[in-house]
Image (cartoon, rainbow, N blue to C red):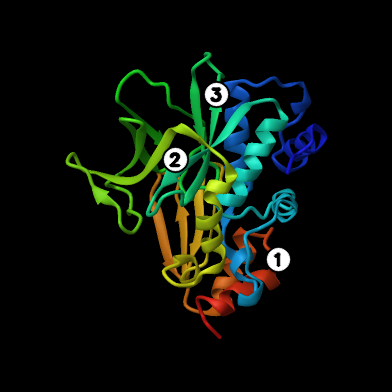
C-alpha cells in the first residue's frame, strides 16, 4: 500500500492542479497548499460506499481508494485520509496516523505530520472531515488553547493532558451528541495527539461504517460535502446546503428523487449518476 513519487506528482498536477510539485521539499507552506486544494477538489462522500448491494459492502481496498481519489470521487475519512497519508509520504513528509474519538474510540482516522517547523513540531491534518480545515493545525502551540476561524466555522483546540479537544462554536449547528462546555462551545471530538497509530487500530470501527446499517446515520442520510473556493456545498439526505459569500449557510429542502439526483449532477459531477441513483434508492427514498 504505497504511492510512488511519480503517481504523487501526477495526482497533484492533474487532480489538485498544483504544478511542479516534484521540485518541492517538505514544508509547512507546501503542506497547506496540498490540504487546501484537496478540500476544494475531493469530496467527503458516502454515496459510492452505500450504493453497493448489502451483500457486497466492505472496507475499501487500497486499489479502490487510489482509483477513486484519482477520479476525484473521494470518500469518507478512511479513504481520504489514508490516501493523503500516502501522498505526503511520497513527498518525504514525516507522517503517521492519529486517532480521533467522536462518538466511539478510533471512529475517525486522521494524520499527524512531524518536524516541519522544528524537531518536535506537530501539525494535524484532516481531509476526511465534513468540516472546513483548509490548513494543517499546529499542535505545538504554547498556550492551552488556540482559536481559528476557518471557513464558516469558528473552532478551537484545547490541550487536556495527552488529548486535544476539538471544539466548535455554538453558532454552528452541532453534530448529534455534542456536549456544551462550561464556556459555551460544542465539544466535538478528542484527538489522541501523542499516540501514533497503526492502520489496523481503525479496522474494526471503519469496517462497521461501511457494512453495518444499525445506528449508522449514513445509511439513512447519504451525503456529499465539498468546499468550492472555500465555500461549503453539501447534500445531506434531501437537503441542499450552500454557504453564501458572507458565511451564511442556506438550506433548501429537496422534495423528490429527481430533485436530489439533479443536485448531485449539478454540484458533484465526478460522482456517476448510476452510483448516486443506487445510493438514493437504498437510503433516502427506499424505493
Give the numbered dot on residue 114: 3
In the image, 216 versus 203, the foreground residue is 203
Dot 3 or dot 2, earlier in sequence: 3
Give the numbered dot on residue 151: 2
**Do tag 3 and tag 2 residues touch (Cβ < 8 Å)?**
no
Reply above or below: 38 against 68.
above
In the image, 40 versus 200, the foreground residue is 200
- How many numbered markers are drawn? 3
Q: Position of residue 238 (x, y in %)?
A: 47, 71
Dot 2 or dot 1, earlier in sequence: 2
Reply above or below: 124 against 279.
above
* Residue 83 in sight: yes
Q: CA distance from mark 3 to mark 2?
A: 25 Å
Crowding around mark 3 (Cα neighbors within 10 Å: few <14, some 14 to 19, many 20+) is some
Which element is circle 2 on? loop
Relative placement, left or right, of 110 versus 180 is: right
Crowding around mark 1 (Cα neighbors within 10 Å: few <14, some 14 to 19, many 20+) is some
Residue 163 image-quadrant placement: top left
Q: Nearer the viewer, mark 3 or mark 2?
A: 3
Q: Position of residue 241 (x, y in %)?
A: 46, 59
Identify the residue shown where x is 66% and y is 72%: 56
Reply above or below: 219 against 178.
below
* Residue 53 in sight: no
Identify the residue shown where x is 60% and y is 59%: 267
Crowding around mark 2 (Cα neighbors within 10 Å: few <14, some 14 to 19, many 20+) is some
Q: CA distance from mark 2 to mark 1?
A: 28 Å
Q: Which residue is mark 1?
A: 272
Relative placement, left or right, of 132 versus 176 is: right
Q: Nearer the viewer, mark 2 or mark 1?
A: 1
Give the numbered dot on residue 28: none
Q: Position of residue 151 (x, y in %)?
A: 44, 40
Residue 88 image-quadrant placement: top right
Amino acid at each position: 500500500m504505497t504511492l510512488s513519487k511519480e503517481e504523487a506528482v501526477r495526482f497533484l498536477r492533474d487532480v489538485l492542479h498544483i504544478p511542479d510539485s516534484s521540485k518541492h521539499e517538505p514544508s509547512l507552506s507546501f503542506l497547506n497548499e496540498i490540504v487546501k486544494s484537496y478540500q476544494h477538489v475531493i469530496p467527503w462522500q458516502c454515496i459510492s460506499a452505500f450504493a453497493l448491494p448489502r451483500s457486497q459492502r466492505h472496507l475499501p481496498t487500497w486499489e479502490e481508494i487510489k482509483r477513486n481519489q484519482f477520479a476525484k470521487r473521494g470518500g469518507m475519512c478512511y479513504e481520504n485520509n489514508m490516501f493523503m497519508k500516502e501522498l505526503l509520504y511520497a513527498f518525504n513528509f514525516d507522517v503517521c496516523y492519529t486517532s480521533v474519538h467522536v462518538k466511539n474510540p478510533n471512529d475517525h482516522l486522521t494524520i499527524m505530520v512531524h518536524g516541519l517547523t522544528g524537531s518536535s513540531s506537530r501539525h494535524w491534518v484532516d481531509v476526511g472531515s465534513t468540516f472546513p480545515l483548509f490548513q494543517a493545525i499546529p499542535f505545538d502551540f504554547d498556550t492551552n488553547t488556540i482559536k481559528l476561524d476557518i471557513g464558516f466555522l469558528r473552532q478551537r483546540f484545547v490541550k487536556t493532558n495527552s488529548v486535544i479537544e476539538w471544539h466548535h462554536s455554538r453558532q454552528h449547528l452541532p453534530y448529534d451528541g455534542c456536549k456544551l462546555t462550561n464556556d459555551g462551545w460544542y465539544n466535538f471530538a478528542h484527538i489522541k495527539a501523542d499516540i501514533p497509530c497503526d492502520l489496523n487500530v481503525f479496522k474494526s470501527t471503519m469496517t462497521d461504517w461501511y457494512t453495518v446499517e444499525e445506528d449508522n446515520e449514513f445509511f439513512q442520510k447519504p451525503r456529499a460535502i465539498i468546499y468550492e473556493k472555500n465555500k461549503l456545498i453539501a447534500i445531506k439526505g434531501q437537503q441542499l446546503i450552500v454557504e453564501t459569500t458572507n458565511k451564511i449557510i442556506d438550506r433548501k429542502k429537496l422534495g423528490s428523487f429527481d430533485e436530489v439526483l439533479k443536485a448531485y449532477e449539478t454540484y458533484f459531477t465526478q460522482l456517476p449518476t448510476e452510483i448516486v441513483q443506487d445510493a438514493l434508492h437504498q437510503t433516502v427514498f427506499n424505493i
